[in-house]
Structures are given as structure tokens and as C-alpha cells.
Amino acid sequence: MRSEACGGRQPNPGHSEPPPRAMRSNRALARVQRRRASPPGDPRRTPTLRRVTRDSPWRPSALAAAVAAGLVVAAIVAGITYLLTSKAHDRSIVGGCASFNLYAQNQFTPVGTKLRDEPKPTARAHPIFAPNEIITVDGWVRTRTPYPTNSPPWDSDVWYHLANDSGWVPFAAVRSVPTTPDPEGGFGKGSDPAPTEPDCEGSLRT
């Protein structure tokens, strides 16, 4: 029997010696070869891929849930946007009647008709209607007259609402039929005033 003092080493019967490095390398190579030789779908073939797929946040079920959540958010945003902007698209007149045609005045200088953003004399004006051009309206309201010094009925405070909701034209600037320039150079009585049927009267949207 050898003693530890002489540099000897006592074998341990309950503990196996680790295999040599060459043996461990051979075993690892054998495992790789078996994995390569295994049929497709064998868990031993792609254990790393299975683990990544199972743990990935972009697996099919998670991706479908993300898409569904995105669609829900988009629908909510669209609904909120509609509620916030729908009032801006409401017609500026409440009530009114079926559309009918008037004509831009051609009697007094300056001929033609200006379109205004609101039914009041101080509203922004757009000179877009030529003399006798057809203007389609769908109702009228009373506010302030733009020509208080005109003789009746051309001093009226009636404003007609355009059927396409693009603005308003005043009573004195339109006629019920096409007209010709005033022979008295703008000092005549005028003719063919636009109708103000009671069932076409509306009110401003507030």
C-alpha cells in the first residue's frame, strides 16, 4: 500500500474517474452525427429552434394578437376623429327646403355676385359669380342687411344659403330670372327679386 507521504493517491471506490478529453470529444461528435441523421421533425434535430420559437414574442399566436390589437386601436382613433370633426362638416343652415335656382344680378354696377362665408356684410367675400350665372340655393335666413340705404325690397336682410354649403349670397345680389343692365345707369328700381317662400326659411346652426 502506498502512503500519501510518498506521493501516492488512494483510489476512491465510490467515485468514477472523468473520461479522458478525447473520449468526451468522441461522444459529442456522436451526438451531432445522431442529430443530423434523425428524421425531420425529430425534437433532437432542432432543439434550439424549437426553444426560440416557443419563447419568442413573435410566435404566430402572439403576432395575431398584436395585429388584432392594432386594428382595435385604429378603429378607436378613427371613431374619435369622426366625433371631433363631424360638427365641422354639419351644414351651416338648419331647415331650408329643396334646392332651387337663382341668378347673379346683372342690373347694377358692379354686376355679378359675391359669395360670403357667413350671412353677414363683414364676412369674407369671394367674387365668383358672373352676371346671370346660376346659383343653386336651398333656403334662406335673416341676419343683417348689407345694403341698408337701398330702396325696398333691395334693403332686405335675407341671405340665401348655397345648396353645396359653400357660403351665402344676399337678397339684393340675386334675381329670380336673368336680367339686363339697368337703363338708368344704376338708379332704376330693379326687377325680379328672388322669392322668399316661408317654407324655405331656416336658421343658422350654432
Image (cartoon, grey):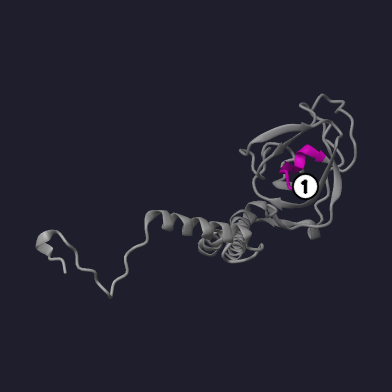
Q: What residue sits 64% from the left and 43% below the top?
A: 120
Horizontal relation, residue 11 to residue 115: left or right: left
Q: What residue sits 58% from the left and 56% below the top?
A: 84
Of 30 and 40, nearer the camera is 30
Of 147 and 84, nearer the camera is 84
Q: Is residue 16 above or below residue 203?
A: below
Horizontal relation, residue 87 to residue 189: left or right: left
Q: Position of residue 183 (x, y in %)?
A: 87, 26
Place residue 199 in its image quadrant: bottom right
Q: Quadrant of the N terminus?
A: bottom left
Place residue 5 in its image quadrant: bottom left
Name the residue furthest left.
5
Q: What residue sits 62% from the left and 66% below the top?
A: 42
Residue 183 appears in the picture as rendered: yes
Q: Is residue 144 above or below residue 53?
A: above
Residue 29 within the segment the image draws in magenta: no
Provide the residue designation for mark 1: 164
Horizontal relation, residue 94 to residue 187: left or right: left
Q: Quadrant of the C terminus?
A: bottom right
Q: Amino acid at mark 1?
A: Asn
Residue 73 appears in the picture as rendered: no
Q: Position of residue 27 (x, y in %)?
A: 47, 59
Q: Determine crowd level at label 1: few under 14, some 14-19, many 20+ residues with C-alpha closer than 10 A.
A: few
Residue at disc 1, secondary structure: loop
Residue 168 within the segment the image draws in magenta: yes
Of 98 and 4, nearer the camera is 4
Q: Position of residue 65 (x, y in %)?
A: 59, 65
The residue segment tinted magenta is 161-174
Q: What residue sits 61% from the left and 53% below the top?
A: 85
Q: Position of residue 154 (x, y in %)?
A: 75, 40
